[in-house]
Image (tube, helix red, strand yellow):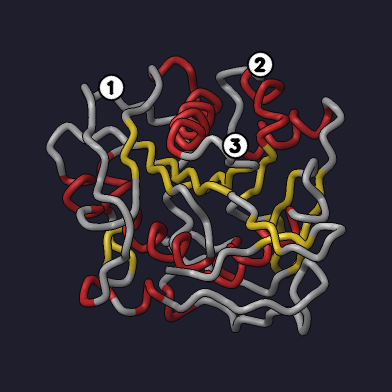
């Protein structure tokens, strides 16, 4: 079980912060695409779990069961997508709804396109811890001046998000959400995986250059690098949730 990031209350009590990971795959092929010897969504789920994200929801069409097979034994809920004409925003909202149904104390969601397979667990932990003192802000990791993924979206802003246009890309949606008055902050976490997707081989990534101090301003224990161990070290947690009727994929969805 990973160390749960948290916030300290006025009384000194360490209150866990529940932040979901919502992984968005535009197609089954994207979901199970190879990521250094592992299916993409499985690698992401392992990293999210190691970094302290809970619950973990993968939104993906799965007509042949390949996505469920890739996630078997992991602490993940596989959710059928929203209707294709709802666009990327519909898929994000769908994942958030499933996460809230799983743990109603969820405070925020890491919106995570399935192409972003090289993010490190330290980045997940840093974003969750930074959410504690900044509970109303969108938080994005940055590397070398570029904004990356996953983006932490507070659930208090999901109503505004749901009202945005279906034809907007995930980056556009975050910009549109910020234009409604939701604060946005970028964190330079030194993780090249936050901006380089799986089209860049993992061995070709720039060097990791993490900050000397965590983004939240205090030291914490990082989650273990579970994704580097493969299926010989399965995750602990609930079994894969049943998957309902498949919905046609939308090529314009993130991931």
Which numbered disc covers residue 170? 3
Kindly report which numbered mark, 2 or 3, lies closer to the viewer in this rendering. Answer: 2
Pick whichever, 231 or 6, lies toward us.
Answer: 6
Q: Please state, as top left, top right, bottom left or bottom right, where the C terminus lies in the image.
A: top left
- Whole-angstrom CA distance, mark 2 to mark 1, is 22 Å
Kindly report which numbered mark, 3 or 1, lies closer to the viewer in this rendering. Answer: 1
Measured along the vertical axis of the image, is residue 63 above or below residue 43?
above
**Helix, strand or loop for disc 2:** loop
Q: State which tag comes first along the sequence, 2 or 3.
A: 2
**x and y percent of residue 24 in the render?**
44, 41
Measured along the vertical axis of the image, is residue 72 above or below residue 12?
above
The residue positioned 30% from the left and 51% from the top of the image is 238
Circle 2 residue: 163
**x and y percent of residue 160 in the render?**
71, 22
**x and y percent of residue 147 in the render?**
70, 55
The residue positioned 54% from the left and 35% from the top of the image is 104
Instruction: Spot the residue most to the left.
Output: 64
Q: Please state, as top left, top right, bottom left or bottom right, where the N terminus lies in the image.
A: bottom left
Circle 1 residue: 247
Pick whichever, 197 or 24, lies toward us.
Answer: 24
Q: Which corner quadrant of the image does residue 29 belong to?
A: top left
Q: State which tag comes first along the sequence, 3 or 1.
A: 3
**Helix, strand or loop for disc 3:** helix
Q: State which tag comes first along the sequence, 2 or 1.
A: 2
Q: Is residue 251 left or right of residue 95?
A: left
The residue positioned 58% from the left and 41% from the top of the image is 106
Q: Which corner quadrant of the image does residue 5 belong to?
A: bottom right
The residue positioned 59% from the left and 36% from the top of the image is 170
């Amino acid at each position: 079980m990973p160390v749960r990031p948290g916030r300290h209350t006025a009384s000194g009590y360490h209150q866990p912060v529940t932040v979901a990971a919502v992984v968005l795959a535009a197609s089954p092929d994207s979901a199970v695409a190879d990521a250094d010897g592992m299916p993409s969504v499985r690698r992401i789920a392992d990293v999210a779990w190691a970094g302290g994200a809970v619950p973990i929801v993968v939104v993906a069409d799965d007509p042949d069961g390949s996505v469920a097979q890739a996630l078997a034994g992991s602490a993940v809920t596989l959710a059928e997508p929203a209707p294709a004409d709802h666009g990327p925003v519909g898929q994000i909202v769908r994942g958030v709804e499933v996460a809230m149904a799983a743990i109603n104390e969820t405070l925020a969601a890491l919106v995570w396109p399935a192409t972003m397979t090289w993010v490190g667990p330290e980045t997940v932990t840093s974003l969750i811890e930074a959410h504690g003192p900044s509970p109303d802000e969108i938080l994005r990791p940055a590397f070398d001046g570029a904004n990356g993924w996953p983006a932490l979206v507070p659930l208090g802003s999901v109503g505004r998000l749901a009202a945005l246009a279906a034809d907007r890309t995930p980056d556009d949606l975050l910009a549109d959400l910020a234009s409604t008055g939701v604060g946005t902050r970028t964190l330079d976490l030194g993780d090249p995986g936050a901006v380089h997707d799986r089209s860049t081989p993992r061995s070709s990534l720039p060097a990791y250059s993490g900050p000397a101090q965590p983004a939240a301003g205090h030291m914490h224990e990082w989650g273990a690098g579970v994704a580097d161990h493969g299926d010989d070290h399965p995750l602990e947690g609930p079994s894969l949730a049943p998957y309902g009727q498949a919905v046609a994929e939308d090529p314009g969805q993130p991931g």
